Image (cartoon, coloured by chain):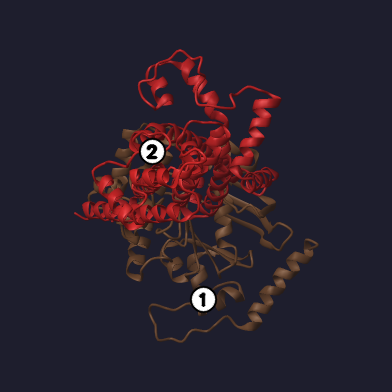
Chain colours: A red, B brown
Amino acid sequence: MPFLRTILARLAATLVTLFGAAVIVFVVIRVVPGNPIAMMLPPGATEDDIARLQALYGLDKSIFEQFVIWLGGVVRGDFGTSISLRQPVLNLVLGRLPATLELSIMALVIAVFIGGAMALTGTLRRDTRTEAAIDVTSGMALSVPDFLWGLILILLFGVLWPVFHISGRVSPSLDFDFQTQFYLFESVLRLRFDVWADLVSHMFMPSLALAIPLAAIISQLLKQSLKETMHLDYVTLARTKGYSEASVITREALPNAVLPTLTLIGVQFTFLIGGTVIIERLFSYEGLGNMAIDAVINRDLPLIQGIVILFALLFTVVNLVVDMTYAALNPRLRHA
Amino acid sequence: MSFLEVENLTLRIARGPRILRAVSLGVDQGEVRGLVGESGAGKSMIGKAILGTLPRAIQVVSGRISLDGTDLQTLPARERRRRIGAQVALIPQDPLTALNPVRRVGPQITNRLVDILGWDRSRAEARARELLDEVHIPDPDRVMRSYPHELSGGMRQRILIASAFAAEPKLIIADEPTTALDVTVQKQILRLIKEMQDRHNTALLFVTHDLGVVSKICQSLTVLYAGKVIEDTDTRSFFAAPGHPYSQALLHATPKYTDPEDSLTPVPQHVIDAVEAEVTDFDKGLGA
């Protein structure tokens, strides 16, 4: 069963990756200056108080001992207790994950639509001014980082023409009792489109800010790969059959050209998830990234570790999904 | 009046040299015409011009192409595309690159029938099965479900031939259809194309640089040099006595199956000079 072996190999690789990430973050946050105890105690606390608190959180032991204790907990599903929020890290992190997932997936969808439309239009109108305009636009989109796009969007749609909400995830005035943390998904399932509209209005700008650079990358790479495909014999053959240029592009060239782009989208999507940290802060969006910044400010070691492990897990899952999609779209790999 | 009429077709690369020089040729129903010339003589460009797939950088300077008496240039773009799709088909040069690698073979045979000609799917699939049978492919159903990479080159060329004949086109353009194949497969494919052409009584424009192939399947031929028609004649008189010195030289430069040990003569320089002079004179006459 080569398929099963592939899956097992991937799982093993994932575990090694996560372990590596855990070691790095564990050591780094303990080596850099600043300690959580100092953040908790009022000025004028005695040496004795500090020592007692350090012992309470196990911070008096060596880094290696601390790591073994922490790892032992993780194996049992216990990621420790947040120092600043005094709640189990696992609950905190899983409670915030859906918000970040919804935001990044919405950003991904927007990026694929905008980038795809630009690539297809650019290919259809290749070697014309339209293509040149698309190239310039994506070049500009790419050279401005996502958080600056966030600020630009806030200026445009929050200040000059205030149509979207500029902060938070949902209007507090909204009378709706969420049963899950997947607000957007739940609002659709429960057919509450007023709630859905409110959520989208909050998510629109942060997700667009995240999407713009990715859309530009998709547009450039997909267009390049479409244009190369347009010279191939099977595309010419389809033309002789009577298909219009637009259907030749979408029916014959696109399914092939999308393959290299897909791999890139996977890599870029993990960058996008990384970008949520700043974007969530900018838009006061209650997600994992926003929590990560607070955790770092408070030197909340267990929480930082939990968040980093979750991000690492997210990255490996994204890559796995990309590889599986690639195999599903490429018949030459499916039977291999 | 032949089914395909190409009259005085002149093409040039935008702001560049001419690649076809007032080419005229015709192919009638049931006729097989060879289109021969060296690499770069413009053979394939004629096919591309007829099919409407000329590269963007190439301009039509003058001339007309008509199918069944209709000048294609007078038709609106969409109608022209559909007319060509319905009446003309291409057998491409390289079967390894002419099938879409991510799509199954079946839909690649039936798509013209369904999408362009409006057949319903089951009728188109029945037709595809019948055609695969005609091109001697065993187990058509399995082949239609296959992806191109699962089939051999010869098999793929058979599929492309079946696909070309699917819509009962009036004209087939075969663009060096055996060049990319194994020598042993070449013969079978050549025989198959001739057999299909006979059965469907199609006009066939056979682009090749191989005079041996021409002698086997063509009734008439057009010899091209630097985009200019050097000779247009029927095959029998060509092989008996080529009219133009360049054609004679070309014939001498072709290996003979009857006498493979016979040494080949390259086209002599004075013949090339003479034919180049003709091309230059032609260009001067047009003021270029």
Q: Is residue B71 above or below residue A29?
A: above
Q: Is residue B183 above or below residue B51?
A: below
Q: Chain of mark 2?
A: A
Q: Are marks 1 and 2 on the same chain?
A: no
Residue extending furthest toward the left: A1
Q: Nearer the viewer, residue B242 or B127?
A: B127
Q: Residues within 10 Å of mark 1 (few under 14, many from 20)?
A: many
Residue B8 in the image: x percent, y percent? 67, 55
Q: Which residue is mark 2?
A: A82
Q: Residue at x 59, y 27 (%)?
A: A166
Q: State the SS at label 2.
A: loop
Residue B211 in the image: x percent, y percent? 47, 70
Q: Chain of mark 1?
A: B
Amino acid type at mark 1: Leu
Q: Residue at x 34, y 52 (%)?
A: A18
Q: Nearer the viewer, residue A126 or A55?
A: A55
Query: Image quarter for residue B192?
Result: bottom left
Residue A238 in the image: x percent, y percent? 47, 46
Whether residues under marks 1 and 2 lie with C-beta atoms below 8 angstroms apart, the answer is no
Q: Which residue is mark 1?
A: B251
Residue extending furthest toward the right: B287
Q: Residue at x 49, y 72 (%)?
A: B239
Amino acid type at mark 2: Ser
Q: Which mark is residue B82?
A: none
